[in-house]
Amino acid sequence: MYNVERSFRLAFPNKEVISFFADTEADKAKWLEILRALIGRIPPNPLWAELVWQRQEEILSGAQPRPSVLPPVTEGTSS
């Protein structure tokens, strides 16, 4: 690809392609290891969208809402 050593690309079903270029073979191997571990495991929606969808389903079904997974926001506190 591109006649560049240590390059690789991710091709998506929508025909989008992301090209990667690693500085070393070790870097390329690490990138590929991580990407292989992630492929097929990333949910289609971000966590916040999943939580909103679940809450919407609870409201529509009349079920009691589940406790929040996030800590409550308190005003006037600083970290």
Image: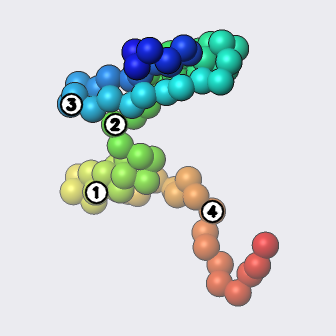
SS of the residue under disc 3:
loop
Q: Which image quadrant: the C terminus?
A: bottom right
Q: Which residue is mark 3?
A: 14
Marks 2/3 in contact by CB < 8 Å: the verdict is no
| Residue 57 in picture, x, y percent from top left | 27, 51
Mark pair 3, 1: CA separation: 29 Å
Sequence-wise, the earlier of marks 4 and 1 is 1
| Residue 78 in picture, x, y percent from top left | 76, 79
Mark pair 4, 2: CA separation: 25 Å
SS of the residue under disc 1:
helix
The amino acid beneath tag 2 is Pro
Q: Which residue is mark 2?
A: 44
Q: Nearer the viewer, residue 73 or 78?
A: 78
Tell me what residue is drawn at x 49 percent, y 18 percent: 4
| Residue located farthest toward the front when viewing the structure as drawn | 3
For residue 15, side relative to residue 7 (left or right): left
Which is more foreground, mark 2 or mark 3? 3
Marks 1/2 in contact by CB < 8 Å: the verdict is no
Marks 4/2 in contact by CB < 8 Å: the verdict is no
The amino acid beneath tag 1 is Gln
Q: Which residue is mark 1?
A: 56
The amino acid beneath tag 3 is Asn
For residue 23, side relative to residue 49 (left or right): right
Mark identifier at residue 71: 4
